[in-house]
Amino acid sequence: MEKKAQDIIYASVGEAHVQDKTKKYHDPLLKLYHGRPLCINQNEDVSGCIANGAMCEFRGVKLKPGVSITDFETILIDGYCVNCVCVTQIESMVVKMLDGTTGGDEEHFIELKPKTIYASARFPVPCVGPITKKSMRVSRTISFEQFPVNCANARTVHKLQGRSIKNLVSYALPDLVELDRTYDTSMIPWFKHLIHKSDTKDIIISLNGLRHKTALDMALRRRQALSLYRSSSEFRSLRQWVATNSLSAQRSLQGVSSRFISSSHLTIEQKSDRSNWEHRPSKEDLKFGTTLSDHMLMIEWNVGKGWDTPKIVPYQDLRISPAASSLHYGLQCFEGMKAYRSLLDDNSIHLFRPDKNMERLSNSMHRLHMPGADFDPDELIKCIGELVKVDKDWIPSGEGYSLYLRPTVIATHRFLGLAAPESVLLYVITSPVGPYYKTGFNPIKLTSDTHYVRAWPGGTGNAKVGGNYASTMKAAAEAAEEGYSQVLWLFGENDEVTEVGAMNFFVYLINKETQRPELVTAPLTRGDILPGVTRASILDLARSWGEFDVSERYITMGELKEASDDNRLLEAFGAGTATVVTPVSCIQYKGEDIEIPAVGDLTQRVWDEITGIQYRTKEAPPGWIVEL
């Protein structure tokens, strides 16, 4: 490995001055950069050996004596490196050139040594179109980048502003306040790669001089998996900097912390009256969704405070204005998940893949443009876990029994206009449920509907919103009158199969072209299929078995009919949280019944595997089970 020691010269650029309300000039960058996290990405030549535009990947960092590794974290996101460690803590580092600037495809490593204590936080340069009257001029030279900005109480002036010389490029950046409300962030590379990355870890956003509250608010309102402030010690270097360098940043970050759901602030009010528990039906008499437990979780969000303190309270009716937008415009979404009691001797309780439910709930809220959608999923899972533990006596024991959980988000804003709500309520209620099939598998008959459509591209089919279910009621009732259990939903001129009832749909057949067995379900790419948790689990398991082809593709009723005629149609089943899997024995299509063999080996195997994981009699893949 080639190493070449180079000094990185990091210093306050000292070429921007802010005139605040007191008419005093000072250098905000000097204060901002001192002790800030050091980030090296696609940037200018700051070391004398990294070419303009080079991407670097951290390969090794040697910290100074006494520096804890917990203060340091390197994350590679779509090729961009984010290194959360203060430059004063680094003795040396090794980076690998990624973009071929050294010539050829050979690996090239450089050892870098910080020389001074001032470091700017560097991110990919935004190129956002032509400069307008409402835009700021962003200058970059061979040694630094500068983001002059306008805020409500300060004006930044760059001494190189407006100059057009070699190695100086101008970019347009709208005023922060305007950017907060109207700017299309998809045009900016660092928003695309950093903020829109749903699986990123907590990252401190430091866009050079953007340290005003408007900048923090801007970041919070974007769809992101970021938390600028945590109660844990993950970013104590940031909080230390905040405490010693910036009063405005202190106030801003204190406001930020209240915007996120925090399980550490959860309050619990126990119900004293146990009559509901004492008069509950026997577990053999449980009917889905009719028996409700003693407590519920409630978390409010409003535009002034963000997410309020989570509360577990006795189950109660909601007080809501008749003008609430959820009642008029369908601004509500929900989830379905379960808590299980282990069949092992420890009788422990746990959740099954709750992260998938939280991800889908957030996506549903985003689809409806509901505020608060950037909640911390881990914190909400902890709150739900506490609710389950409060009502753990309500979880029936035995295979097939569980506590059904219904997280729901409704808009509570008292406003008859059609607009994004200024207040929402997230609540979770629970209900003990028994086996969906009390006497074993009961295959169902379907009718394929060529008249009604459940979902369509660009609609809300991939979100779990109430409107998706309300529009299916009429078709389901008509199917029941004709003796069919569910509706098989079709789409398009070729009658592509999408879902069945409220479940994802799977077909197991012999592929005509390959003559290999193939498990097929509709893909998520078009946006008309709900990303079911059970669906994802079946796909994961089937692919891990490696015994047959697994495809996410569209299949038409014509292909199903042909497969049936050729005796290549082996099995079909629906999949969802309530039933796990539901075998299908017949599909009515244009007046003709397509017969499907009874419960097959694959359907039974999927049922056995998933229920075994849920009740802990089978080993679960990593991360699928969350113990409470």
Image (spheres, rainbow, N blue to C red):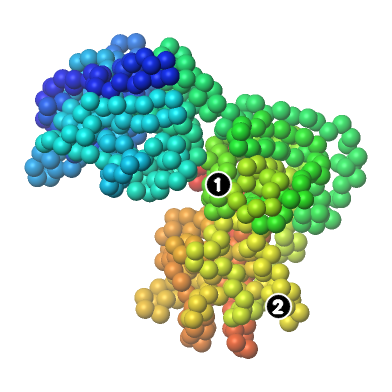
- Using the image, determine if residue 595 lies above or below residue 331: below
Q: SS at mark 1? A: helix
Within-10-Å neighbours for mark 1: few <14, some 14–19, many 20+: many
Q: SS at mark 2? A: helix
Residue that protrudes farthest toward the left in the picture: 103
Residue linked to disc 2: 479
Is residue 184 in view from this perspective? yes
Q: Residue placed at 13% from the left, 22% from the top?
A: 5
Residue linked to disc 1: 362
Q: Quadrant of residue 175?
A: top left
Look at label 1 and name its amino acid: Ser
- Using the image, determine if residue 280 lies above or below residue 549: above
Figure quadrant of the C terminus: top right
Look at label 2 and name its amino acid: Ala
Q: Quadrant of residue 89?
A: top left
Between 23 and 436, which is closer to the camera in this rendering?
Answer: 23
Between 441 and 252, which is closer to the camera in this rendering?
Answer: 252
Mark 2 vs 1, N-terminal side: 1
Figure quadrant of the N terminus: top left
- Using the image, determine if residue 382 lies above or below residue 339: above
Q: Residue placed at 80% from the left, 31% from the top?
A: 270
- Using the image, determine if residue 170 lies above or below residue 484: above
Q: Measured from the top left, where is residue 324 in percent x and y?
A: 71, 49
User: From the viewer's perspective, is 371 left or right of 282?
Assistant: left
Q: Measured from the top left, where is residue 305 in percent x and y?
A: 61, 32
